[in-house]
Amino acid sequence: MIVFDLGCENNHRFEGWFASGQDFDEQIEHKLITCPVCSNANVVRLPHASHIRTSPSPRPASRATPGAGQQYANVGNEVFVKLVEHIIENTEDVGPAFPEEARKIHYRETAERRIRGTASREEVEELVDECIEVVALPIPAYRTGKSH
Ligand SMILES: [Zn+2]
């Protein structure tokens, strides 16, 4: 048995018990379900209360879970993957030569372009010290070519 939350045209809410989803479909189709309050037969299935997505509620306490991997929590994973893909499509992979290339570009020793690659934490800190903009991105391993 399954239970569905149902509603009629007059905004009455009630529950309906059915043998299966197919049973529900058949009863709905033949208008066998009527509102117990007003006998209205235009009954629709309502999303279960616990599955309704309401507008953001002011509950900052429940969101305060900082930590590794949490900084993109406000962006849907799908959106984030697209963003990473976009960056990958629009940058040149220089691999481990990244710090060197970033420096060359910064000091105009080579053509200015967008690059990506790998760098150690220390190398990144050095670049930042030299006012070279570096953005750390968790690029999926399958897109970097090789693991390090
Ligand atoms: Zn009703």
Image (spheres, rainbow, N blue to C red):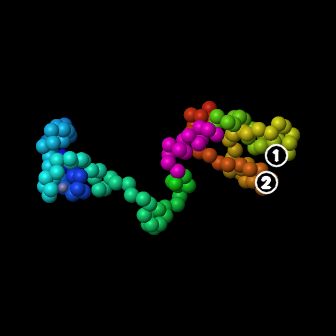
Ligand 1 within 8 angstroms of badge 1 C-beta? no
Residue 15 appearing in the image = yes
User: Quick one: SS at disc 2?
Assistant: loop
Which one is in front, 96 or 30? 30
At 42% from the left and 59% from the top, the residue drawn is 55
Does the CB distance between marks 2 and 1 fall below 8 Å?
yes
When asked about the image quadrant of residue 86, the answer is top right
User: What crowding class fits label 2: few (fewer than 14 Cα within 10 Å), some (14-19), or many (20 or more)?
Assistant: few
Residue 80, horizontal then vertical, whole percent: 55, 45
| Residue annotated with mark 1 | 106
Residue 144, horizontal then vertical, whole percent: 62, 35
Residue 63, horizontal then vertical, whole percent: 47, 62
Examine the structure image and report whether residue 44 is included in the region drawn in magenta: no
Callout count: 2
Which one is in front, 85 or 128? 85
At 21% from the left and 48% from the top, the residue drawn is 43
In the depicted structure, whether residue 74 falls above or below residue 100: below
User: Quick one: SS at disc 1?
Assistant: helix
At 62% from the left and 32% from the top, the residue drawn is 145
* Type of amino acid under label 1: His
Left or right: 72 in relation to 29 = right
Examine the structure image and report whether residue 77 is included in the region drawn in magenta: yes
Left or right: 70 in relation to 45 = right
Ligand 1 within 8 angstroms of badge 2 C-beta? no
Looking at this view, name the residue that lies furthest to the top.
Answer: 145
The residue stretch that appears in magenta: 75-87
* Type of amino acid under label 2: Cys
At 14% from the left and 46% from the top, the residue drawn is 33
User: What crowding class fits label 1: few (fewer than 14 Cα within 10 Å), some (14-19), or many (20 or more)?
Assistant: some
Labelled disc at residue 131: 2
Q: Quadrant of the N terminus?
A: top left
When asked about the image quadrant of residue 108, the answer is top right
